Every structure is written in structure tokens, then in C-alpha cells.
Image (cartoon, helix red, strand yellow):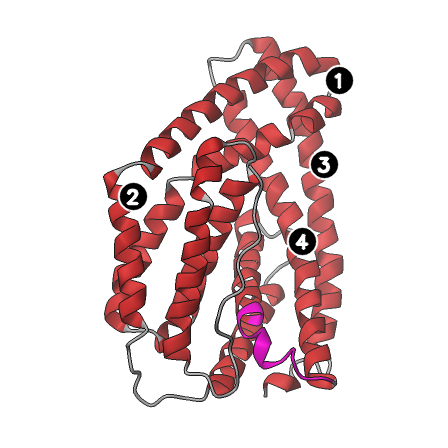
Amino acid sequence: MKLLNKKVADFRLSADSDLSFLLPRHLMHEFDYARTLEKGVVAETEPEFNHQYRVTLRRIRSLLLLLKANFCPFEFKLLKPHLKLLMKQTNTLRDLDVFLIDREHYLNRAPEHSDKLASVFDVIETQQIEALTSVRQWLASDCYLKTCVMIENSLRRASQYEADNVQSIVVCSNKRILHHYKLVSNACKGLHRKSNDGEVHQLRIECKKLRYLLEYFAPLYVPHKGHLGIQHRANVKQLKQLQDRLGAFNDTSNQLDFFRKQQNDKQFTKPQRKAIGQLLTLVEKDHQSAKLAIFADLKTFKREIKRSDALTIYA
């Protein structure tokens, strides 16, 4: 089964768009795409189906939260917990998929323990099969189908909502983007080389939110030739570079948490736990290197957003 590209929406943001009308339609378009991925998740021919399913649901929920002021309050309260419920069901499967995808990488990192580590990954594969079975049952359940219908109906109703004191979409976009640049900047200021993983992860979360806003509102900026479009693209590119670095750090953080749990799991023999310990030592080094790399990118990012023209396009 091949992962298909998302269909182009039959609507597009413009300076005279009504955000309270178009936002629910955009979220519905995204949700329809998520549902097309269900068969691929069930078939498990390619873990990327589950990854894109989760990314799409996360994007929907994030935009809903970020643009809450432009969304029907009743439907917002209805959608928020149900979208979270859908995302939660695939957490374990995704975590295990990631470790199995990188199995050869881990085995090559500690070749002297490859036999013992291979047997550890056999156990992880069994856990992944169990998680996949659970997800398959969930996607086929009445509860899942009813939740999807409820979300779809809620989004349709939301498109009929008429907000009071409506700002132009450009004013709204500029305010939200500048506000989240400020949140990202504040999160950067509080970081130092001794910051814990949770503090670094918080910056990653704020960067994700900003990226969702920049991408969603891009049609208001990018079609323009000249400075406006060029600078918006440059801002997205700069943020993506920082996100990639933060993502690499988060990956090693997750690896450490996962392998520490495996090392303390009594189902593994002493030689197996020793092999996991050797792998942990290597991942800890990667983790520290990834952390140092973040601060080099942070310096560049902060310098770029302080430039007089980087954020003036949103003023």
C-alpha cells in the first residue's frame, strides 16, 4: 500500500477570507485525510501511515487551540477532548515503530553485544504486534466510528458560526504569529546548557505551534512577489532548522527513557541488561552532543528574529 498525497483543498485563504468559516473547513479537509490513512495503519505495511495519521490529528488539534477565538465555543469544547482521545490510542504503537525502524542502527552501535540486543528487539517486536492489534481493534470499534462522526458533524456545524467583533484575517494572522514568536523567544531565553529535557521539550512544543501558524497562514504572504513572500519563506526555513535540531535532541531523550525502562525490566537476562547498558552509554553521548548543537542553532535563530525586517512583515 502506497502513501498517497493529500488532495488539494477546493478553498484557499485570502485577505478577504472569513476565518471563522474557513478554519472548520480546513480542519475537516485535514480530518478527511487522516481517515484515508486508516487502512494503511491497519495494514502496517509502512509505519509512515501511522506517523502521518498522528501528525495530521496533532495539526488539527493545535490549530483548533491556537485559533480558539475564531471558533465556535460550544464546538471547541466538544472537539478538544475527542481529538485528544484519537491521538492517544496510537501513542504506544508509534513509539515501538520508531525503535524497530532503527533496529539495525542500534545493533551496529554495539556490535559486541549484537546477539543479546537482537533478542531484546525480538521482545520489542512482540510488544509492537500487541500494540498494533490494539490499534486495529480500536479503529474497527463502534466507539471510534461514533467519535469520528461526532467530530465531522461538529466541524460542519462550526462553519456556520458567526463570530462577534470579527478582525480581518490578516490582522488576526499577524497578531497570532507575533504572539507565538514572543513565546518562542521567551522559551529560548530561559534555556542554558544545564536545562533539563522537559525545558528543551517545551521550546520544541512552542516551535511546533508557531510552525503550524506560519504554514496555515502562508497563503496570505507567500503569493506576494518581493519582500513579503521571501521573508515569510525565510522565517519558515529558519524555524524548521531549529525544529530539526530540537527533534534530534527529543529523539535521543526518548531513546534514553525507553532503554532505561528496558534495562530495569526483569524479563531480560543479566547479559541482555548489560547489553542495553552499553547502548545507553552510547545514546547518552549522542544526547549531550545533540544538546550542544541546539545552542549553536539557537544563537543563529535569535540573531535572525532580532533583525529589523524579519518580523516586520507581521507588524
Q: CA distance from mark 2 to mark 4?
A: 33 Å
Residue indicated by mark 1: 111
Residue indicated by mark 3: 285
Label 3 or label 2, whichever lies nearer to me, is 2
Q: CA distance from mark 3 to mark 2?
A: 42 Å
| Spot occupied by residue 217 in the image (x, y as percentages of width and height) | 54, 75
Name the residue: 62% across, 31% down. Answer: 101
| Spot occupied by residue 11 in the image (x, y as percentages of width and height) | 48, 73
* Element type where label 1 sits in the image: helix
Residue indicated by mark 2: 144
Q: Is residue 26 above or below residue 56?
A: below
On the rendered image, what quadrant is the C terminus found in? bottom right
Q: CA distance from mark 3 to mark 1?
A: 17 Å
Q: Amino acid at mark 3?
A: Lys
Which label's residue is closer to the chain start, 1 or 2?
A: 1
| Spot occupied by residue 178 in the image (x, y as percentages of width and height) | 55, 79
Residue indicated by mark 4: 244
Q: Is residue 296 above or below residue 129?
A: below
* Cβ atoms under marks 2 and 4 closer than 8 Å: no
Q: Is residue 138 left or right of residue 175?
A: left
Magenta-colored span: 214-225
